[in-house]
Image (cartoon, rainbow, N blue to C red):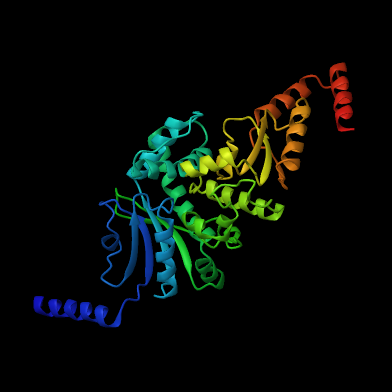
Amino acid sequence: MQLLRLGFFLDTRKALVVKGQAPMAAIVGCSDSRAPVETIFDAGPGDLFILRNAGNTCTHAEGSIVGSLEFCVGKLGSRLVVVMGHTNCGALAGAAGTYLGSKGSEETQTTSTALEGLLQGLTSVASQAAEEMGGKPTAAELASYAVKTNVFATINFLLKFSEPIRELVRSGALEIQGAVYKLETGEVEFLGRSPKQAELLSSKMFLPPSMAGTSDAAVLLGAHGVRTPEDPPMKPKEALRLLKEGNERFAVGAPIAGKVDAQMRKALATVGQAPHTAVLGCADSRVPLELVFDTLPGDLFVLRNAGNTVVHSEGSVLGSLEFCVGALKSQLIVVLGHTACGAMKGAVKDYLANKGTTRVEETRKSIWVVLW
């Protein structure tokens, strides 16, 4: 019997070498030693095309993960991709701790190791999970909840940044499913498709964020690597495209901006500025505009006040914008509000408390004066 079994395995290995592979599925899983994918699915050589990293994420390894999956579903013909997280995930526990530790801080988080970068990249998942949970979860509660959130975040990333994958999903030739392996029982809970699949299939993004630096958008950033007056004014359509793409990178926790070297700083100091967009935003510390749009120094001419308004600071705001579009030749202005705005909450509260009083009438008159 043992000789027969040995012969079978030798023949199998030979077939895989000579005829090649045709895996039935691709699995994106965590590196955790307690979650061996082939063992979990009782699979043999040639059955599964497996990609693993800490946290089963695309946050920092998006080029290799997405490219590898495009090879698997395109060249090898696999028709199922499963993104599988697991309970008690150490990467998400670290991300939850990092998120809760930095919550409310206005300081920019710096990294000194690749691990710190990985955990900070996963804080966007922890933030989304915390928002979905509500209340004040502990780090352990947040990490546990974030397992499923992270699975769908990875699926969403694949759909958003790969046209070959989107095309196969649209045609019905490929399924992308989520799953969670439970360390405690050995069972796999299958989660199905991403709730955002239909929406993401309309994405126009063709490259993962870390690879976008080689796209035509990077050329628009200027001869010095940052925008200066030596670069021509950017058309509004192109500027808006850069803002949208930058925000998509920020939203999925995979920014590429912020790497400014000495030559770039020198160019900004000596050659000058030529921002492609002026942005009027709120002073709220939770809305850092350069980070929200994943931009470099020299990209944005930023104006901020409580409520992103011109009601009382119209002289400085309007004068500053006239300088930007006139002297600096920017061709796009964006006025950006945000959810949960404290200024708007205060204004609404004050209005409702004083509704029907003379003060409201006087305020209304003053507003009409400003508008007209």
- Residue 179 at x, y percent in the picture: 41, 56
**Relative to 317, is 29 above or below?**
below
Q: Residue at x 60, y 38 (%)?
A: 289
Image spot of residue 310 (x, y percent):
76, 30
Query: Is 175 placed above or below 234 here?
Result: below
Q: Position of residue 293 (x, y in %)?
A: 59, 45
- 311 displayed left or right of 120: right
Q: How many marks?
A: 0
**Residue at the spot 78% in from the left edge and 29% down from the top edge:** 314
Q: Position of residue 350 (x, y in %)?
A: 75, 21
Q: Quadrant of residue 333?
A: top right
Q: Relative to residue 304, is residue 9 drawn left or right?
A: left
Quadrant of the rendered structure where residue 116 is? Answer: top left
Q: Residue furthest top?
A: 358
As drawn, 39 above or below 255: below
In the rendered image, the quadrant that contains the N terminus is bottom left
At x 84%, y 17%, the residue is 359
Q: Is residue 300 visible?
A: yes
Q: Determine if residue 88 is in view.
A: no
Give above or below for 368 relative to 61.
Answer: above
Left or right? Give the position of 361 relative to 169: right
Instruction: Say which of 60 and 321 sits in front.
Output: 321
Residue farthest toward the front in the current orientation of the protein:
270
* Quadrant the C terminus occupies: top right
Closest to the observer: 231 or 146?
Answer: 231
Nearer to me, 18 or 372: 372
Q: For this rendering, which residue is in front, 267 or 192?
A: 267
